[in-house]
Image (cartoon, helix red, strand yellow):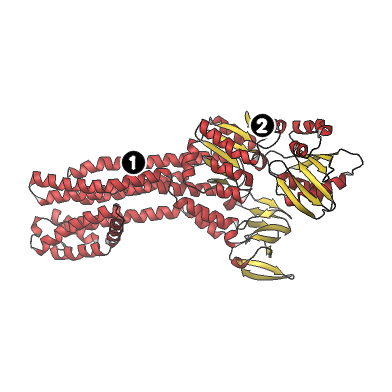
Amino acid sequence: MSVPLLWDMVAAMTGMPGRVGPVGQLVLGTLVQVTAGLRFYRGAWSALKGGAGTMDTLVALGTTAAWGLSAYRVVMGQEGQGLYFESAAVVITLVLLGKGLETRARHKAASMIRALMALRPTLAHLERDGQLEDVEAERLRPGDRVVVRPGEALPADGRIEEGTAALDESLVTGESLPVARGPGDRVIGGAVVTDGLLRVRVEAAGDAAVLARLIRLVEAAQAAKAPVQRLVDRVAAIFVPVVIVLAGLTFLGWWGLAGATEPALSAAISVLVVACPCALGLATPTAVMVGTGLAARRGILIRDASALEQICAVKTVVFDKTGTLTAGRPALTRLVVADPGDADETVLRLAASAQQGSAHPLARALRDAAQDRGVTLEPFSAFTSVPGQGVGAQVGEVRVWLGSRRFIENLGLDPSPLDTLAVSLEEEGASAVWMAVGNPPRRLVALFGLADSLRPTAREAVARLKARGLDVILLTGDAERVAKVVAERLGIDDYRAGVPPEDKARVVAELRRTGPGVAMVGDGVNDAPALAEADVGIAMGTGADAAMETAGMTLMRGDPALLVEALSLSRATVRRIRVNLFWAFAYNVIALPLAAAGILSPMIAGAAMALSSVSVVASSLWLRRWRPE
C-alpha cells in the first residue's frame, strides 16, 4: 500500500502519469496507518500507561502528525499546500522492514537453542522383562532401563550398564570428537551413539536432565540484560521525552522563521522519526544473543549475561584443585598398615565401607580400589563428617575413622609413626589419608596414598592466563607439600594450602578487597559459597549441580582450557557491544541536527533509522566470525 503513495510523489515531481490523487492517497494512507501502524499505537499506549516513552512513541507521534495534517488538507480542499501520506506510510514500512530484519537476525542468533532442542529424542526404547517397548521419552523415570541403538540419541541422563560405544556429545559439551563410553560411565541425554549398542539405567529425565537445564539456562542468559544494557535503558527513558521536546522546539523554530506550517511540520516529523532509539536498544541484546549462542556451541554455558562483562575485568583467577585442575578421579597409590598383623584387604574393606556415605573424590577412590581388588564392602551406619577434615562410620562391630593428620590428632592419637611416609607421599603430590579404628580405645591403623592426575590442558591453560597478564592462584584444602608440588607442576607461583571449605569464600572475599576482578573456578558443593562470593563464578560441568547453579558461567567439558576461550569470547562480545553503542549514539548525534535543520525529509529519516538498526544487528552477527585463539 505504500508503493502507490510513493509513486504518486515521484509522478508529481517528474510529471509522469499514474497519479493516485488526493482521495486515493487518503484511503491508502489511512489503511497503512490503521493496519501496519497499529503495532506502534499499541506500543505507544502501553509505554504511556507505564509512564515511559519508547521507539513506538516517536513513530506513532511522527506518522500521526504527517497523516493528520494531510487528511485535514484533503478534507478541507487544501491538498495544493502539500500532502505527506507517502512520508508516514514509508516511515512505517521502513521501520517494519528493520524490525523484520532484526527478527531474522535474532532467529539466527537463537539457533543454538533450536539445535539443542532438536537433540531431544521423542521416543525411547524401554526395556521391561527382556522386552522392548517404545514410549515417549518424557515418560521415562529414574530407574528405568533403556536401549540405545547406533545413530540414536540418548533419551535421558543415566549410567551405562551394558555395552560400549562412541558418543557424539559436541552440542552438549562442545567436544568435537566422539568419546568412548562403557559400563559404569555416566552419559548425558541428547548425546548421539555413533556406533555400538548401549543399555542405560536412567538417572534423570525430562526437565531434570542436563540437556533441559542447559536449554533453560541458555534461554535465560539470552533474555537477561547485561549491566551496560540497564544503563542504555535508563538513557533511552530520558532520551524519548527530550526528543519530543526537541521536535516541538524544531516546529516552533521553523514556523517562526519560515512562517509556514509545511517545512516546520516536516522538520519536526523528521526529528521524531530519525531519533527513534532502535539501534540503541538493539546494540547490547543482539550481541549478547550471538555471544551466548557461540559460547554454548563451544561448551561454555553463560548463565548470567553480566558474567560476559565482569569476566573482562578479571585480574585474578582462583582455581580449586580437585576436579578443576586435576581429573577429580584420584587413585590409590600406596597402602601402609601401622601394625603388620592387620591385613591389607581387611583394612581396605573397612576403609571403603566407611566411605560409602561420602561423595568426596578421595572416598570414591577408596571404593574404586576395593572394587578393583575384588573386596566386598560391608554395610555401614552412624556416618559422621567433619568438613575438610575427615569422616567416621560404624562398619560391623568396628568404628572407623578416616581423615587428615589433624583429624587423627583430634581423636587423641599420635600419627608420628607414619609421618615419614606421609611426607614422602605428599612430596610426590599424593594426598595422605590416615585411618584409625576404635571408639575408644582407638588405635592408628593405616595410611593411604591417593594421587590425582592433572587435567591434560591444565598447565597450558595456566600459562595462557598468565600470558594475558592475569594472576593465577591455587586454592586447596590439601597439605602444604601436596599443594606446592601441584602448583609447581602447573606453573602456579601463588598457592593457598590447607584451606577448609568454609574458608574458601573468605579467601576470595579478601582477594576482592585487595583488588577488583576476581574469578573463582571450582566444581564441588563446597566451592559454591566461594563461587558466589567471586566477581565471576565459573563451574566445571563435570562437577556438582550446586556449583553450576551458583556460578555465572559453566565449562561443560570440565576443560580448564575452555576458560581461556570464555575470556576471549567474552572480550570479543563486550567489544562488539561497545562498537554497536558507539555507532548507535553517533547516528543520533549526526542525524538529529540534520533533521532539525530540514536537510533530512521524514522519508529519508525513516530510511536512515531503519538502516541504523539493521547495521547494528549486522554488526552483532559479525561476532559469529569469532574463532578461538
Return the x and y of residue 447 as percentages of the image width and height.
81, 39
Residue 480: which quarter of the image?
top right
Kindly identify the residue that appears in the image at 75 percent across and 33 percent down: 426
Return the x and y of residue 597 as percentages of the image width and height.
17, 42
**Residue type highlighted by circle 1:** Trp
Q: Is residue 153 left or right of residue 248?
A: right
Residue at disc 1, secondary structure: helix
Return the x and y of residue 13 as percentages of the image width and height.
14, 53
- In the image, 83 versus 437, the foreground residue is 437
Determine which residue is flagged by label 2: 487
Q: Is residue 436 left or right of residue 470?
A: right
Distance between mark 1 and mark 2 Cα atoms: 46 Å
The disc at residue 189 is none
Q: With respect to residue 5, does 476 lie above or below?
A: above
Kindly identify the residue that appears in the image at 53 percent across and 55 percent down: 215
Residue 150 in view in this figure = no
Residue 588 in view in this figure = yes
Question: How many numbered marks appear?
Answer: 2
Q: With respect to residue 125, does 317 lie above or below?
A: above
Q: Nearer the viewer, mark 1 or mark 2?
A: 2
Label whose residue precedes the other's in the sequence (1 or 2)? 2
Return the x and y of residue 28 as percentages of the image width and height.
21, 64
Residue at the right extreme of this rendering: 341
Determine which residue is flagged by label 1: 583
- In the image, 133 versus 216, the foreground residue is 216
